[in-house]
Image: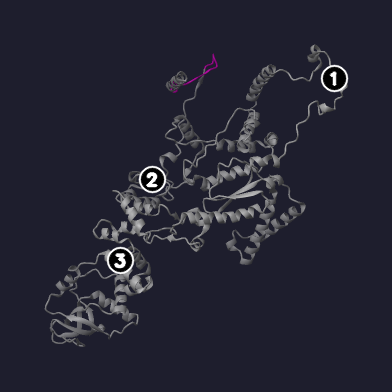
Amino acid sequence: MNAVTQTAAAEPVSGVEIFVPLAKLKKSPRNARKVPHGEAAIEALAASIQHKGLIQNLVVEPETKEDGTPTSYYLVTAGEGRRLAMLLRAKRKQCKKSEPVRCWLDTANDPAEVSLDENVTRTPMHPADQFERFAELSNDKGWGAEEIGARFGVSASVVKQRLRLGAVSPKLLQVYREDGLTLDQLMAFAITEDHARQEQVFEGLHHNREPWIIRRDMTASNVPATDRRAVFVGADAYVEAGGNIIRDLFSEDRGGFFEDAGLLDMLAVEKLREVAATVQAEGWKWAEAHIDYPHAHGMRRFYPQSVSLSDEDEARLDTLSAEHDALAEGYSSYDEMPEDVAEKLEAISDEIDAISEKRHAYDANVIAYGGAFVVLHHDGAVRIERGFIRAEDEALAFPQPEDEVDGEGIDPEGVEDEQAEDEPEAEDVEDEEPGKPISDSLTCDLSAHRTLALRVALAEQPDMALVALTHTLTAQLFYSYAEAGCLEVRPTVTPLGSHADGIEDTPLAARASEQHEAWAERMPRDVADLWGFIVALDCEKRTLLLAHCAARTVNALRLPWDRKPLSLQTADRLATALALDVAKDWTPTVESYLGRVTKGHIVEAVTEGVSEDAARRIADMKKPDMAQAAEQLLAGTGWLPSILRTPEPETEQPASVEDEDTGTVEPSEAEAPEAQAEDGEAAYAVAAE
């Protein structure tokens, strides 16, 4: 039947195709859809009509007045979304409101039923079919994401996601069609377009198919863009060298994943070697580039020594400092300053820093025979460690004076032969050689008496005991000379890197290293001068040095094969005394805690750190989503797992009572049972030994 252009309501004839001006179409009051179409849906329909025309007719009926008189308008029974899309096009000047719209006139059926039928009696396309058709449009017609998005009224990012899903292995798409995979799981596989890898990971999955596990396995051999190597090399240099970056279009990937770890390592080492060449040009004998710091190098390290500035530098420094203060006066930050003033002040600051660096310099021999390690810091910045001398070069760097010859410097070969003729009889030699060393047995005897006297005297002078203890610890921790001190105290520094991955590259570890280097730079080069250095320190600085040495030996590790409850109890008491707050340097994240514990632990953490309501809101989530949500909820709360918490201070115990007759200290009645128990435990320990 030929279509008819309808400009005014005619005698109702059901079942004919007519063309009605857009302005003559109205929403039907009997439309079954009460919730209006979303903006995105109308945008998509408008884009589709703009590129492909109206694919499906609108179903209409004539509008009439109460007396049955036609109004010349038509009510849209089915196709209200398309009507709104046409109006949107008219608003955008893509068409006129007088443009005829193809409609199907239906007066035989109930409009409400027709409207309901259109929205209910239909089968939506399976998402997998949609993904594959989008991929075909891209592959067969060469359309990009922008072109496809414009034709279907969706954003380019949505198109890219659908194209990525359409590029998943056909085998996995079929499993998805058969409900063997969820959409979330399919999106996890789509992190890479490598079909072989997708199928390999799918075959390796067991009962646990959570998306985060799939993503983890899919990127197991890749390097996240947040890795220090990736940050150091940079995405542009990596791609230019032929590397590929995998992007996760369905979750926050923080820059993606670098696919070729070997290429990334090679580029990082090459770039570090360029820095090492610059460092070696300073005059060092060698400079090595490593991604990780080589802790097992076994070399002695020498630090820069304090150097007095020249008169010229001192004068220049005074001038610059005065100029800096004058320019900065009245401003609290660079942001408040005029641009020219800020630039000048920054230049002055840089020159002040350059001159100040001259206050510390390496010994010329250390530079001539020593070297440096160029490594990567935890944040991807270059870390340069100078001042290491190999064992075979130490003798060249610091030659030892030749031993003095026997006989107070007299050369035995220079003694005249006549002296030999006048040698006394053998029995008189012992009496006539007062310089002959005493026997070893007598030496041990006398030194034992002196050692005992030293012990008693040192115990009576705590200030000097502090000096001796500081000297012994410092000699071993800074010079590796255990024999330099006379106290048999041996510090043990337990490396933590093997117990917590990446801990040596954290900001807290950097602070510990900076503390050690700050002291090392002040130490005398020769350990023989260390005693005088420590004695010359004032009491406060000497105490700080002792505290630093003691701190290096702290060990509060909880190891399954090394049970030490008393040591751990002491560590707790030390933490309490220090008012230790680990929350300043550690936060619960998916990587540090939440992704490594059970869902029960996560709920418990949110309950303690936030509230029970917050914990209930995430209780039904899948574990990866729960961990991510918990990380956001716990941020800034200061919550810590029990193992990181500092115990509350213990309540004061009753004072002990001193026995007036014997002078011994007896425990109070409240302490007595505990004291007896401790005595029993001590006795048991002795018996066991």
Q: What residue is rendered at 33% in x and 65% in y?
A: 162
The secondary structure type at the circle numbered 1 is helix
Amino acid carrying mark 1 in the image: Ala
Give how far across and how far down residue 396 sits, in percent.
Answer: 70, 41
State yes or no: discs 1 and 2 in contact (Cβ < 8 Å): no
Alpha carbons under labels 1 and 2: distance apart: 85 Å
Q: Which residue is mark 3?
A: 131
Residue furthest to the left in view is 108
Query: To which quarter of the image does residue 124 belong?
Result: bottom left
Residue on which disc 1 sits: 420
Q: Are the two marked residues, 3 and 2, in contact with CB atoms closer than 8 angstroms? A: no
Name the quadrant containing residue 405.
top right
Compared with residue 639, is residue 268 higher up or lower down, i.e. above or below?
Answer: below
Residue located 65% across and 52% down the image: 280
Dot 3 or dot 2: first in sequence order is: 3
Residue interval drawn in magenta: 659-672
Residue 385 visible in rendering = no
Q: Amino acid at mark 2?
A: Arg
The CA distance from mark 3 to mark 2 is 35 Å
Q: Position of residue 519 (x, y in %)?
A: 63, 42
> Where does the image place residue 166, in percent across and percent down from the top left?
32, 64
599 sits to left or right of 574 = left
Q: Earlier in the sequence, mark 1 or mark 2?
A: 1
Foreground residue among 234 and 635: 234
Mark 3 or mark 1: whose residue is earlier in sequence? 3
Lateral position of residue 133 relative to residue 61, left or right: right
Placement of the N terminus among the 4 image quadrants: bottom left
Mark 3 surroundings within 10 Å by alpha-carbon count, few (fewer than 14), some (14 through 19), many (20 or more): many
Whole-angstrom CA distance, mark 3 to mark 1, is: 110 Å
